[in-house]
Image: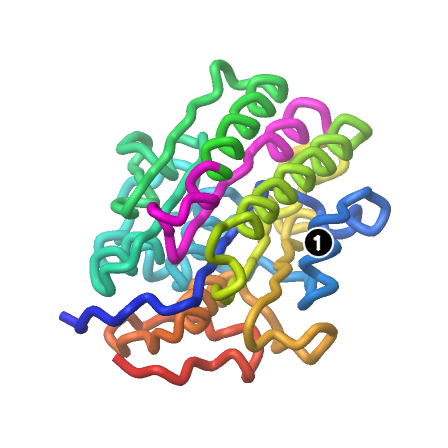
């Protein structure tokens, strides 16, 4: 087992917003995502050929740092997975490095032992808030409650998670029911406002001036115009990552991105060198972000 190291000033917040089309972002009012991009970058990610353009496999790849051949999640039912061998970063950091971690959201397989889950097996703190029904309206209420809970946890100095993942699902649900029209666009803008609240909670922390925060915002897949995904069109395969923080130069060069890079960058941002036995498939976003500490 690796030794426990002091947490230090580094903190990471990953916000996963499900099903946000990259091509529509320039036409939408997303000031908080734009601020993250302006302080770092926003770039497209292509879901690789081996990965179905579905939420389950894409989110598993994002948070484990390995592809489907290793984590074994090939659909929205997670049965047959290998998440015990390739855990999400909140679980690994809590177990191996004794870091305080937090995960929150409302989609069952991510957080509960249902449909072959959970993806987030054992973060230090978990908040599952279920939608009352499977509708866009109910998911907006769910995301609102998830955001409020995450604001509370992120803003507390006594709880103090060093790595957090907050999942927002209403955008994807809206596309499935209503397509990618006006309601979908409004849902993306509402998600951006919730991102802004999470960022404000971070900035309002008592120790914020002494902390070094990395913020990563990521989507899992795109959508067809009429709503829906799972195929191999460019609209479905094109996802994106935005990030800012230590080692990320605003407007600087970014390596070609993959979903596996998110977890790799979380570890780098916390100055943790992954154990070779983890066999991560990703790498930090920029060469400047490579960690200097060793374990």
Q: Which stretch appears magenta?
A: 152-179
For residue 268, which quarter of the picture? Answer: bottom left
Q: Residue 33, percent across and down?
A: 70, 51
Pick out the residue farthest to the left.
Answer: 1
For residue 198, which quarter of the picture? Answer: top right
Residue 174 in the magenta stretch? The answer is yes
Question: Does 206 sit above or below residue 260?
Answer: above
Residue 56 in the magenta stretch? The answer is no
Pick out the residue farthest to the top.
Answer: 132
State left or right for residue 217 relative to residue 62: right
Pick out the residue farthest to the front.
Answer: 206
- Could you say whether the residue bearing mark 1 is in a helix, strand or loop? helix
Q: Residue 240, percent across and down?
A: 64, 57
Question: Does 106 sit above or below residue 157?
Answer: above
Nearer to the camera, 271 or 218? 271
Residue pictured at 42% horizontal, 44% vertical = 156
Q: Quadrant of the N terminus?
A: bottom left
Q: Residue 204, percent across and down?
A: 55, 48
State left or right for residue 183 relative to residue 277: right
Nearer to the camera, 143 or 240? 143
Q: Residues within 10 Å of mark 1 (few under 14, many from 20)?
A: some
Residue pictured at 27% horizontal, 76% vertical = 275
Q: Residue 14, percent across and down?
A: 50, 53
Residue pictured at 77% horizontal, 34% vertical = 185
State left or right for residue 99 relative to residue 32: left
- Residue denoted by label 1: 234
Residue pictured at 61% horizontal, 65% vertical = 244
Q: Quadrant of the C terminus?
A: bottom left
């Amino acid at each position: 087992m690796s030794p426990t190291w002091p947490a230090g000033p580094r903190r990471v917040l990953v916000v996963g917003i499900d099903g946000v089309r990259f091509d529509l972002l320039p036409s939408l009012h997303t000031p908080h995502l734009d601020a993250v991009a302006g302080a770092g970058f926003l770039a497209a990610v292509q879901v690789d050929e081996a990965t179905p353009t579905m939420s389950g496999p894409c989110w598993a790849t994002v948070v484990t740092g390995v592809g489907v051949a290793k984590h074994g999640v090939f659909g929205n039912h997670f049965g047959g997975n290998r998440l015990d061998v390739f855990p999400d970063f909140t679980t690994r950091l809590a177990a191996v490095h004794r870091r305080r971690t937090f995960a929150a959201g409302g989609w069952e397989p991510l957080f509960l032992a249902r449909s072959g889950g959970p993806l987030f097996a054992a973060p230090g703190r978990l908040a599952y808030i279920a939608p009352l029904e499977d509708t866009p309206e109910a998911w907006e209420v769910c995301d609102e409650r998830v955001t409020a809970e995450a604001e509370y946890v992120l803003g507390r100095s006594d709880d103090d998670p060093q790595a957090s993942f907050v999942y927002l699902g209403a955008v994807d649900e809206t596309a499935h029911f209503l397509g990618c029209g006006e309601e979908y666009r409004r849902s993306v803008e509402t998600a951006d406002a919730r991102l802004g609240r999470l960022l404000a909670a971070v900035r309002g922390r008592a120790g914020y001036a002494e902390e070094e925060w990395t913020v990563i915002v990521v989507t899992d897949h795109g959508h067809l115009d009429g709503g829906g995904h799972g195929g191999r069109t460019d609209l479905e395969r094109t996802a994106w990552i935005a990030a800012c923080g230590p080692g990320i130069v605003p407007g600087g060069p970014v390596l070609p991105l993959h979903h596996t890079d998110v977890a790799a960058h979380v570890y780098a941002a916390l100055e943790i060198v992954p154990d070779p036995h983890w066999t991560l498939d990703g790498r930090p976003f920029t060469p400047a972000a490579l960690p200097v500490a060793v374990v």
